[in-house]
Amino acid sequence: MQNVAYLFNSPKEYAMNVVDLPEVATAYDKVGVYDQDAINGFSEQMLTTMLDIVNPGHASTILDAMAGNGNLTLRLYDYCERRGLFPPDIAVLEYSRVQCELAKEQLADTPAKVIWGDILTMEDYENEELLPESVFDRVMLKSGNHEIPLINQLDLYNSIFRVLKPEGIFVNLGFLFDDVEERDQFREIARCKDSLADMHSAVKNRHFLTRDELYTHVSNHGVNSLKINKLIS
């Protein structure tokens, strides 16, 4: 197993005031407050390397997709401040309503826009509209693509490349396997853990990609280059 960052260049309790919106329940509504980076073993160096690849000083618009509580966006603002960079416009997209509320709380002192929506359609649920095409210089995704079922993985990449500018960059930090048996063993361990935590949607949906699956999914998107940085084994 590897934690890898890869990039693609392409042509407490919170009151929920969204009862009139679609009823969407996710595993991360149950999780609430948690430290994703600590759970996944993402070191400071690893996360800084990811943001080095994102290169926010050369981007005007960034989508933080499947953003959870907004921790990566908060880190990006700190990254820019420490380096004297003017931060780009950032949209924070998250499917869990609970995590959206946490993101709004955490990013309240920033100009980031938090959107409750679906990465598979890029729909903004509150405004009932799709995010525009070819609008982002960067799409960044941290430990999220394995939450998408195998049957929807192609939809994930279709959706990301639809909103990415022709010369934009997609940066993903996640799990990647060379060995199918190792992947399947890891998936069963994850399912056992998720089941114990009553995260039943995660038990059903999670799919960890092999390298061959990744290459297959991105091969039909006019990707100009694919770079994989192995961060840990």
Image (cartoon, rainbow, N blue to C red):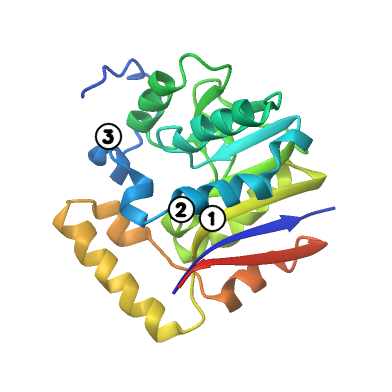
For this view, does 122 lie left or right of residue 29?
A: right
- Which of the 4 image quarters holds residue 62? top right
C-beta proximity under 8 Å, tags 2 and 1: yes
Residue 194 located left or right of residue 211: left
Residue 60 locus on image (x, y percent)? 76, 29
Instruction: Identify which residue, 10 or 128, lies in the foreground.
Output: 10
Real-space Cα distance between discs 3 and 1? Answer: 21 Å
| Residue on which the image places disc 2 | 143
Where's the N terminus, which quadrant? Answer: bottom left
Crowd band around label 2 with a 10 angstrom C-alpha radius: few (<14), some (14–19), many (20+) = many
Mark 3 → mark 2, Cα distance in angstroms: 16 Å
In the figure, 30 relative to 172: above or below?
above
Q: Which residue is drawn at 20% across and 66% down?
A: 192
Say what amino acid the circle numbered 2 marks.
Ser
x then y, percent, for residue 140: 60, 45
Residue highlighted by disc 3: 33
Residue at which label 1 appears:
173
